[in-house]
Image: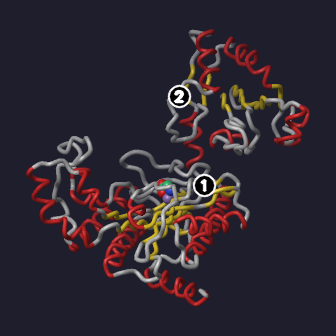
Amino acid sequence: VVSFGGRNLLHDFSTLFQLPAFRYLTERNEPDAVLVMVVRGKRSASTLFLAPIEPRMALYYGTRTVPATSVARTGIPGRPLAELGGVLDSLAATGLPFYDIPDVETMDFAANDTLTRGQQAMKGLARRFPTLTVRDGMRHVLALRAKKSPAELALIRAAAAISSEGHRAAMLTTAPQHEFEVRAALEYEFTRRGAERPAYGSIVGAGINGTTLHYMKASAPVGPGDLVLVDAAAEYRGYAADITRTFPVSGRYTPEQRAIYQLVRDGQDAAERLSQPGMSVRAAADSSVAVRARGLARLGLIDSVHALIDPPWRVDCAANPAPCRQSYLWMIHGISHGIGLAVHDPLQGVGRDAAFQVGDAFTIEPGIYVSTRVLDMLPDTPRNRAFLARVRPVVRRYENTGVRIEDDYIITDKGLERISLVPREIDEIEALMARRRAIQP
Ligand code: GLY
Ligand code: MN
Ligand code: MN
């Protein structure tokens, strides 16, 4: 089993982003290292191949683990990285199959990059040993990572607790004039409580920016009537939380904002009720979509639950009708994913028939995002023209209302447990924000 770890200093002055698979297998943040595990029968032997740091650089960045200190510091025997090539060649010569764990993040956009250090090494090995069997080791590591151990669950709980305090601080930000003031309040709280860093680029979007799912600039002014969507969480000892709250900067939701917010909350509740051990992951998501779609029809934002448009994306509507429904325009993303060493971590259940299992850690995150710019994307067809003529005035009423509510959960033998504890009901949020008004000068 060969697992290349994260590289240090891809650009100077950046911090190390350890690769989740390497961290899972070694529990270490050692930069530029490679784990080789040799398994014969039931016996396994691991070795860490360690990249030296030259003395002057050690004074800049600190010393690294070296072979002589490896067992004491990592529990795994170490060898110099320079010996890796020879060791891999001699292992290949034995004819044992290799399990390659690609050096990319779990769902990395660069998953097919053939130029990473690990991919290069494995390609070279395959060239030198044309009959070598190289299998996908990532599949197995993902299966292991999907079931969280009690120790991992404790870290995920800690990440969620810290993140929750950050969201409280965001809601309590006094009279923010810009998105970055809200971001500063929440990231201050993460840092002060011992988180290493945000688990992903913090999303703080006011008004129309709240309707861009992954808006990460946090650079715009906040208008007095705006909703602010905050999707942000801390990473704690490698483990990520993932929480979203949407609140009105004024402290009071308008009737239109209330209506959309309550639909999203009801959609989250529907999914929560169906997220129990043994229950279908897909059914939970479907019920959340159904609840929100019925609400969108009541508000007049769609003609009916199953009404169709000609979509602006390429999809075969006969084979896959969901992205061709009007309701899809207002809620285009899925509602759940695992959390762990990666923000999007595996769940134990996979595929259409996946069921929730004890040891799962995951989000439930429905949303609704209304803005006329979605209407402007629709291709000019007879069906779309009829829809647009009717719906445009209604959409204007709800213009730039982006709401997502995202919480974190684990499945224990007692059932579903929510571990992100931030106010999420309209009344709770308004009550918390009223305290903010009281402390304003
Ligand atoms: N923060 C990314 C997500 O919610 O999936
Ligand atoms: Mn999420
Ligand atoms: Mn999120």
Quadrant (top left/top right/bottom left/bottom right) for the C terminus: bottom right
Task: Report x, y in % for residue 240.
Answer: 60, 56
Task: Report x, y in % for residue 329.
Answer: 27, 57
Rendered residue at 69%/35% (across/down): 7
Specify the quadrant of the image occupied by residue 156: bottom right
Q: Is residue 356 visible?
A: yes
| In this picture, residue 63 sits left or right of residue 373 | right
Three-letter code, disc 1: Ala
Residue placed under numbered mark 2 in the picture: 113
Residue 410 vertical position relative to residue 98 in the rendered view, above or below: below
Q: How many marks?
A: 2
Task: Report x, y in % for residue 132.
Answer: 59, 14
Rendered residue at 19%/45% (across/down): 317
Three-letter code, disc 2: Asp
Tell me, what colour scheme is on the image? secondary structure
Between 30 and 191, the residue placed more toward the observer is: 191
Between 141 and 73, the residue placed more toward the observer is: 73
Rendered residue at 69%/13% (across/down): 94
Specify the quadrant of the image occupied by residue 64: top right
Mark 2 beta carbon near ligand 1 (under 8 Å): no
> Between disc 2 and disc 1, whose residue precedes?
2
Find the distance from the CA under tag 2 to the CA under tag 1: 23 Å
Residue placed under numbered mark 1 in the picture: 199
Q: Is residue 411 visible?
A: no
Rendered residue at 54%/74% (across/down): 176
Specify the quadrant of the image occupied by residue 78: top right
Categorize mark 2 by other alpha carbons within 10 Å: few (<14), some (14-19), many (20+): few
Task: Report x, y in % for residue 186.
Answer: 61, 67
Mark 1 beta carbon near ligand 1 (under 8 Å): yes
Q: Secondary structure at mark 1?
A: loop
| In this picture, residue 2 sits left or right of residue 331 | right
Residue 139 vertical position relative to residue 80 in the rendered view, above or below: below
